[in-house]
Image (cartoon, rainbow, N blue to C red):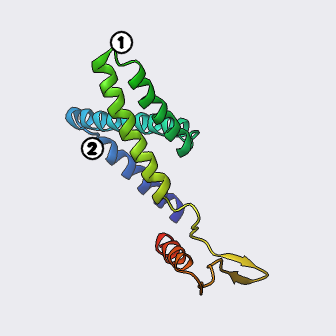
């Protein structure tokens, strides 16, 4: 008996909600929100696919391409002077940014610790006691690892 009462209450709740069906402006607003969400999803998927394609190139390849753009803009300057000037600027910007990424990226550091036989292994260089150049190299390597 209590099962049938509960079932009847749930049916009455559902029928009560049907009477509160959203009006036309609320349905239009909901449709607009869905459309915006669909558009955002498509844009996000497009960005992911572009980034997947761009991730195939290494920084050194980008640097080489920027160098070729700079040289090409210098060689073909007479053919299209205004276009080659913009190509030169783009090549310089691309070269400087790829050089900065190459120099200041943290390639050697990892967030996880390396373990061997249950112990943490550290690859810190030993503190040099020697020439001034070795001490400077040690200082620079500790500064760039942070």
The residues bearing labels 1 and 2 have C-alpha atoms spaced at a distance of: 70 Å
State the residue position of label 2: 20
Q: Residue furthest front?
A: 131
In the image, what residue occupies the spot 65% across and 77% down? Answer: 123
Residue 134, given in percent of the width and then of the height, sits at 57, 77
Residue 127, given in percent of the width and then of the height, sits at 59, 85
Residue 80 placement, left or right of 111: left
Check the image and report above or below for 34 versus 126: above
In the image, what residue occupies the spot 22% across and 32% down? Answer: 24
Kindly report which numbered mark, 1 or 2, lies closer to the viewer in this rendering: 1
Report crowding for label 1: few under 14, some 14 to 19, many 20 or more residues within 10 A (C-alpha): few
In the image, what residue occupies the spot 35% across and 33% down? Answer: 90
Q: Which mark identifies residue 2?
A: none
Q: Residue furthest bottom?
A: 129
Q: Visible in this render: residue 41?
A: yes
Residue 5 placement, left or right of 123: left
Label 1 secondary element: loop
Check the image and report above or below for 82 versus 26: above
State the residue position of label 1: 79
Q: Residue furthest left?
A: 25
Label 2 secondary element: loop
Q: For residue 8, what is the image quadrant?
A: bottom left
Task: Choose between 21 and 55: the one closer to the eye.
Answer: 55
Task: Choose between 24 and 102: the one closer to the eye.
Answer: 102
Check the image and report above or below for 143 versus 42: below
Task: Choose between 69 and 34: the one closer to the eye.
Answer: 69
Residue 34, given in percent of the width and then of the height, sits at 35, 36
């Amino acid at each position: 008996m209590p099962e049938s009462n509960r079932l009847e209450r749930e049916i009455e709740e559902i029928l009560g909600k049907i009477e509160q069906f959203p009006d036309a402006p609320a349905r239009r607003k909901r449709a607009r929100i869905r459309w915006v969400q669909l558009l955002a999803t498509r844009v996000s998927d497009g960005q992911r696919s572009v980034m997947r394609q761009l991730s195939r190139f290494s920084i050194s390849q980008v640097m080489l391409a920027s160098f070729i753009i700079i040289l090409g803009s210098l060689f073909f300057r007479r053919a299209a002077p205004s276009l080659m000037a913009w190509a030169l600027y783009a090549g310089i910007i691309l070269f400087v940014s790829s050089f900065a990424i190459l120099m200041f990226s943290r390639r050697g550091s990892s967030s996880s610790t390396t373990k061997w036989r249950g112990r943490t292994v550290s690859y810190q260089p030993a503190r040099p006691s020697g020439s001034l150049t070795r001490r400077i190299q040690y200082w620079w390597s500790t500064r760039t690892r942070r």
